[in-house]
Image (spheres, helix red, strand yellow):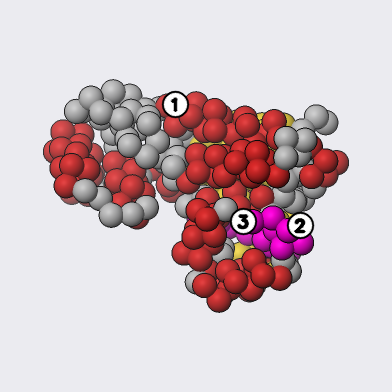
Amino acid sequence: MEPALHLDVAGGTATVRIANPAKRNAMTTEMWRALPGLLERCAADPDVRVLVLTGEGGTFCAGADISSLTEGADRSRDLAIAAEEALAAFPKPTLAAVRGFCVGGGCQLAAACDLRFASDDASFGVTPAKLGIVYGASSTRRLVELTGPATAKYLLFSGELIDAGRALRTGLVDEVWPREALDRRVAEFAAVLASRSQLTQASAKEFAAGPAGPGRIAHWAEQERAGGDTAEGVAAFLERRQPRFGWTVGGPAADGRPDPRTGLPVAGR
């Protein structure tokens, strides 16, 4: 099998699979390059309401494929950071489904997702200290936000792996499941996310990323007034039925402006 990223869309969930089984799903230069464009397609697709990132077979991702780094460490790091930032800025919920090794660039990608569910045999590590590489500033900050400075320093200073139990205790992952139950749990939770209001999710994701200026607060207030999700949510509650939320990411914005973090249009109904 040639190294590649595979995309499947079903039931409102886009599943991106990292596939390089000969090298434990290590990311090649071309795979790093391909990820932002693939994410842009999914962001603009109204049929996609949640994105799951996982690895082919029994491993999530063992990091960068060192043998493919022919453009130098700086260029390779730039490509990895660009892919990571595109994933972090994806305007819909993202969930990493992790089994086996989640190391180096793989851990970088998992940390860029909104949520991380892991199998009980998963292992996590951030390994630039083994290669003498400067870990990116944004990647370091994201790791600190998830785990706190002590665990982030442990991982970065040592390059040692931690198991799923420690990853759960330190906040690196959100849930741990037996290997055989992970896919079912991820599918169930992805369906929950897909059923919820994208208006709530997209605005919360932007606000959680950092302080919002008055213009963005006003933008989301207008989206709430014009989008129709609030009226539908209240009506569904009173009628004791599941809501049918209509606001989506990906079409023309109500005020004609793109989301400043993604460059993609933020849609109303």
Q: Quadrant of residue 154?
A: bottom right
According to the image, label 2 marks what residue?
131
Label 2 sits on a secondary structure element that is loop
Q: Is residue 109 left or right of residue 217?
A: right
Question: Which range of residues does the magenta coloring cover?
Answer: 115-135
Q: Position of residue 188 (x, y in %)?
A: 52, 49
Q: Amino acid at mark 1?
A: Asp
According to the image, label 3 marks what residue?
135
Q: Position of residue 134 (x, y in %)?
A: 64, 56
Q: Amino acid at mark 3?
A: Tyr
Query: Would you call the spot at circle 2 few (<14 residues within 10 Å), some (14-19), or many (20 or more)?
Result: few
**Residue in the picture at 50% in, 43% down:** 85
Could you tell me how far apart the alpha carbons at marks 2 and 1 are, in whole angstroms?
A: 39 Å
According to the image, label 1 marks what residue?
45
Label 1 sits on a secondary structure element that is loop
Q: Amino acid at mark 2?
A: Leu
Query: Would you call the spot at circle 1 few (<14 residues within 10 Å), some (14-19), or many (20 or more)?
Result: some
Q: Is residue 121 magenta?
A: yes
Q: Position of residue 236 (x, y in %)?
A: 23, 44
Counting labels gives 3
Q: Position of residue 174 (x, y in %)?
A: 53, 63
- The answer to the question of whether label 2 and label 1 lie on touching residues, with beta carbons closer than 8 A, is no
- The answer to the question of whether label 3 and label 2 lie on touching residues, with beta carbons closer than 8 A, is no
Which image quarter is the C terminus in?
A: top left
Q: Is residue 12 magenta?
A: no
17 or 112: nearer the eye?
Answer: 112
